Amino acid sequence: MKLGLRVNAFDLGIWLDKNAMPPKDVWEPSVKRAADLGFDGVELCVWFPLSEWLNEEDITKMIETAKKHNIEIATISADWCHSYSAYHTSLSDWLRCGNGIELFKGEIKLAAKLGAKSMLWHLGRAKGTMEELKKIFYYFAEEAEKQKVKIGIESSFWPIIGLGDQYILKELLDEINSEYFGVYIHGGRKAVEIMEKRSVGFHFYVMPGFPTLEEKYDYKALFDTFKKYYDYYIVFEPISHYTKPYSEYLSDKSLEKAKIDFDRIFTKYR
């Protein structure tokens, strides 16, 4: 099991830093920061469909930069699904327009080119029928199998679709029955226990004072569950990634302390 950090390849200046427009290439400082902190790899946050943006030369450069800093591109997180679902509010929109499905297939192909073995996706706040959802699931599962990339719908977004609880999701994954189509856990031990071997990724939400408050979180139970069901990356998802301009996020001192604290916990319980 390895540790990863969520990073950007481009700074869009989303929400906070308007001076960052147009998109600024921040890939090298991002992977260097991850390496300096002692992470094994990174999760590439895709705020807009990078498969539509990057050419083969760009992709090769990203791979070489990561290798230079001895950092693995472990996972990709398709975060543009948030904004896409604001304009495509129903699952029928994804199916009827086709653009969302094709864009996401492009992201799976990009993940394969970058060497990422896992990918997070979700449908934002889009809603629809179970039949529509299954069609989308099968489309994505087919592409994931072709590219040999394990993709997982983010567990925290699943309830928003409104078609059932985590156990219903588990049944759907069993129906699709693909080792490349699962769930990306954004939560704690309970979700891993429910999904068992169906987990393809795990987000560790880093907030001030957390994970330093070891007495308030049963890490032994968490790692015991990992030993049974999950052995890929634990990806740090710091709250500062959303609340600060990206340059401040990279230099955030609290991230250093959180990593030191978790290294101690990781060594103790894994």
Image (tube, rainbow, N blue to C red):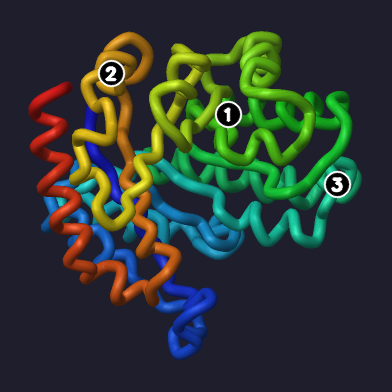
Q: Residue at x 70, y 17 (%)?
A: 168
Residue 163 sits in quarter: top right
Identify residue type, mark 2. Answer: Ala
Q: Is residue 96 above or below residue 245?
A: above
| Foreground tag (2 vs 1) | 2
For disc 3, the marked residue is 90
Front-most of residues 105 and 163: 163
Q: Position of residue 72 (x, y in %)?
A: 26, 43
Question: What's the amino acid at mark 1?
Answer: Ala
Closest to the observer, 193 or 7: 193
Q: Nearer the viewer, mark 2 or mark 3?
A: 2
Mark 1 lies on residue: 144
Give yes or no for contact between labels 2 and 1 (Cβ–Cβ under 8 Å).
no
Q: Going by the picture, which residue comes out furthest to the bottom?
A: 19
The disc label shown at residue 221, or none: 2
The disc at residue 246 is: none
Q: Which label's residue is closer to the chain start, 1 or 3?
A: 3
**Which residue appears at 82% of the width and 55% of the height?**
88
Residue 123, horizontal then vertical, whole percent:
69, 44
Q: Please tell me whether mark 1 sits on a helix, a strand or a loop.
A: helix
Q: Is residue 221 above or below residue 38?
A: above
